Image (cartoon, rainbow, N blue to C red):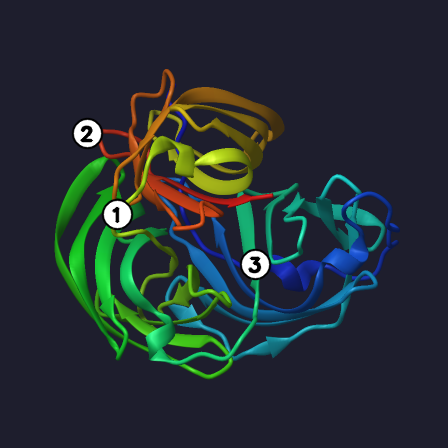
Amino acid sequence: MRRLLALTISLLLAACGGGSKSGGGGSASVATLSGFYWAVAITATTVTTDSETTWGSMIADGAGSIMPNTTSNDDGVVSMPLIFNNFDYEVDPNGEIRFLLGPTPVYRGRISDDGRYAVLSSLTAPRIIVISRREGTHSAASVVGSYQFAGAGFRTGPAAYFMSAAFDGVGMYSGQGTVNEAGSFDGGIILGTYAVTSGGGVDASVLGLAFEGGITGDGNLMLLGGGTGGGTNPQAWFLTRRPDAGGTNSLFSGSYYACGVETVLGTTDEAQGFWSVVRADGSGTFTMQGQTTGAGGVAPLSLSGTYSVAGNGVLTMDRAGLGENLSGAVSPDGRIAIASGGTTANSNPVMIVMFRR
């Protein structure tokens, strides 16, 4: 049976409470996760259930405690922003990070060596969290040029989106988009607006829905959650800026921390979240080693495949044996990669976010 990664959306940062804190040593420690972070979470879903997404921010004290401030869209019902009690986190020297509920880890993933990005997957549900540190001073001009969208959500079934657009730096974008909804496809021209605060907060319209989130200091990554209006289906979006020229396979090279969601289409539909280490060789092959969480609990993840990077930074990934090419992009510095799809008929809805260590 093919693997399906469904998409619902939920930032369960709130679920975490006290616990122990691990110390430093090596290249990473609790101090690596420090400062104000944008955060978006999604929950994978089966074909017959809809979704939730959560977005907002969290502040990490660099000593093992975090305070999230989040909003959720649960089946079209949008919550008021909620500030939750601090919860704890651990960081190992190799960059593994865990969020804790009491003494028990409930999320596991990896943080980049400089603490700018982290990806985590729930140990109890098909759910992932993506965070990026807020840095710099911004305006609409911080988001300009060619961007690729990878999205996850629920329409009448689980859906994954892959789109490309040009942002004009003053508040408008336009491009082309495609959605894989439970293995069937729809698409066309996309038009939208966006606004950026001086702190990097973003308000944007995507496919007619309102979203909120934030951008990284260099503008290469945008995290968005919504829709922020009641009665609209939950969606999560991850955008990376891509180069206009000069992309080659070597742009996607090295070890990346990754997380994603998938819905496995079949007689027994299965929702999964996962995190992994993706190793790209710079010449067109990659491996993924990590774990998945779904109805069957936590299981090892081990995949390989091929990829290509076009001159404009567009990334195509083929996970060997699954027959579901993914479409995405690599940022101009090669640090961020996203992919979603599949792009072939009857392929599973999948979305992946990757950060180079």
Q: Quadrant of the C terminus?
A: top right
Image mark for residue 345: 2
Q: Quadrant of the N terminus?
A: top left
The 10 Å Cα crowd at callout 2, few under 14, some 14 to 19, many 20 or more, is few
The answer to whether 271 appears left or right of 38 in the picture is: left
- Contact between marks 2 and 1 (CB within 8 A): the answer is no
> Depth check: 314 or 333 in front?
333
Q: Label 3 is placed on what type of residue?
A: Ile
Q: Which residue is mark 3?
A: 131
Above or below, comparing residue 61 to residue 250 in the picture = below
Residue 175, position as x, y percentages in the image: 16, 58
- Contact between marks 3 and 1 (CB within 8 A): the answer is no
**In front: label 2 or label 1:** 1
Say which quarter of the image contains residue 232: bottom left
Q: Which residue is mark 1?
A: 245
Residue 229, position as x, y percentages in the image: 34, 76
Q: How many marks?
A: 3
Q: Residue at x 80, y 56 (%)?
A: 30
**In front: label 3 or label 1:** 1
Q: Label 2 is placed on what type of residue?
A: Ala
Q: Label 1 is placed on what type of residue?
A: Ala
Q: Residue at x 26, y 79 (%)?
A: 170
Cα distance in 3D space between marks 3 and 1: 28 Å
> Depth check: 35 or 156 in front?
35
Q: Residue 158, can we see it?
A: no
Label located before the other in sequence (2 or 1): 1
Q: Residue at x 22, y 58 (%)?
A: 165
Cα distance in 3D space between marks 2 and 1: 30 Å
- Contact between marks 2 and 3 (CB within 8 A): the answer is no
Cα distance in 3D space between marks 2 and 3: 32 Å
